[in-house]
Amino acid sequence: MSTCKDPKALLHRGLSMARRSQYICQTCKSVAAFGQGALHRQRPEPFRLLRCSDVAIRTYSTDNPLESTRQTPHRRPIAWALPLGRSSYATVSSTDLDGELRSLLQRGTAILSSNAPPPSKEQAETLFRDCETTAKNLMSGRDGSSLTPSTRSGPSSASSALLNLEEEGGAAKPAMPVPPAARASRKKAIESLSRLVYEVIVHPAVFITPDLLQRYITIQRLLSRPRSFPEVLHLYATKPIPQPDTTPATYRTPNPDRVQFAVPKPLADTALDAAIKVKDLSLALGVIDTTYATRAFRRAKLLRKGLVPLTGLALAPVAAYSVASQLAMLQDTMEPELATVIAFAGIISYVGFTATIGIVAVTTANDQMDRVTWVAGTPLRERWLREEERAAIDRVAGAWGFKERRKRGDEEGPEWERLREWIGRGRMVLDRPELMEGME
């Protein structure tokens, strides 16, 4: 039997056998890929920064089907290139976003013009809807997340094989670095868009509708610019309302305590989440003051959740008397009038006792409380009406304090002391000692 003494032939023979056989694990597959790549000795292609003007675009021509032309836009947009295999690249341009932003700025300038008539609700809402779409497109590629390859070649080195193993295991792929020029351009666009929607919504002639407020909160949250939330939320209830068909324009002062000026709870939660995300305590407390702590918010909760039970409680005596009258007709041991009175008293006593127990159970429930609780002696009515406010403060305290339960109570610093004092003024207690872990 002859033997082969050529080391390359032995290596090729071993690789072919490995391809025909089943690998025991992914590591064996990576080693095989490394050996195959070692024969070719190809250096991996480095990352390069390209411009759209340097990319040849192939077009069809009747004279020469393979004629290449070079892209020459009015402005040279920046694009990022990601190596795909050996020669393919995926590019993302900012030309479309620049055009959209320029159009939005022109429409916003027309609304803010002193000579322009007051904008209609539809005009402002359409502008904000387009701004929201632009903000989503603008922020989708902020960290390079949009720079993802469309195709991928096979592994050509041990590093690519290991990266394939990581991707197959479901691990997140590292984000591509954004060039400095693109980062500065995107930051400028973010500031321009944020400033535009702010100037439009605070303009005296623009009426803040619930849909307009919702889109403003969404846009600023996407752009990570929530600093103006307390001011805009305050204007939502106090901004003078322009009167239609008046020349010159006249305004009516609204009543901020009316139910229609209450900020919806989902929108308030979104604004508070954005404030907590940027770690601004003053901003978070301002959002709570202008949403959960307002009288309009409490009236809206009473109307939304308390109207049906109160209506049923008011109609209970009438329904009880009707039932008692019918029950009195089913007996012959006493006078119908006396039987009606006894039955009516029994039904009212049962309904009143059951309703009282239910109200006490709902208003004294504390399983949802984490670090912020009520001061002893707080009326049950106030506890129920202000539960959303307490829950929001509880979220703020949880975001600024220690996450480990055993460390709770050891927080210190000016911001923590300010938060504790602010909570105390609202008839609440932060970290009640008898409710802390190990202090029972």
Image (cartoon, grey):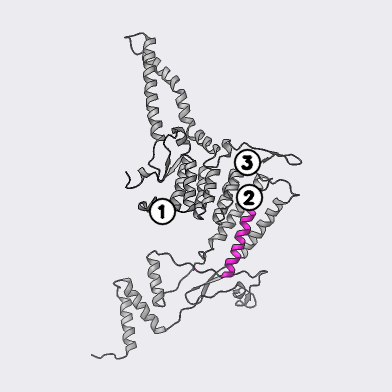
Circles 3 and 2 in contact, beta carbons < 8 Å: no
Q: Dot 2: what SS?
A: helix
Position of residue 62 in the picture relative to residue 415 (left or right)? right
Q: Position of residue 249 (x, y in %)?
A: 73, 41
**Residue 237 x/y as whole percent:** 60, 41
The circle on residue 126 is: 2
Q: Which residues are magenta?
A: 174-202
Location of residue 394 with respect to 225 vertically, above or below: above
Secondary element at image label 3: helix
What x and y, as percent, mark residue 289? Answer: 54, 44
Looking at the image, residue 15 sits to the left or right of residue 47; the answer is left
What residue is rendered at 36% in x and 12% in y? 339
* Majority SS type along the magenta span: helix
According to the picture, the residue beneath numbered tag 1 turns out to be 402
User: What is the CA distance from the residue labelled 3 to the residue labelled 1?
Assistant: 37 Å
The residue singled out by tag 3 in the image is 238
- At numbered mark 1, what does the secondary structure look like: helix, strand or loop? loop
33 or 337: nearer the viewer: 337
Return the mark for residue 93. Answer: none
State the residue in front, 394 or 17. 394
Q: Nearer the viewer, mark 2 or mark 1?
A: 1
Which residue appears at 37% of the width and 81% of the height?
36
Q: For this view, does 113 lie left or right of residue 436?
A: right
Sequence-wise first label, 3 or 1: 3
**What amino acid type should be assigned to the residue bearing mark 3?**
Thr
Q: Nearer the viewer, residue 403 or 417?
A: 417
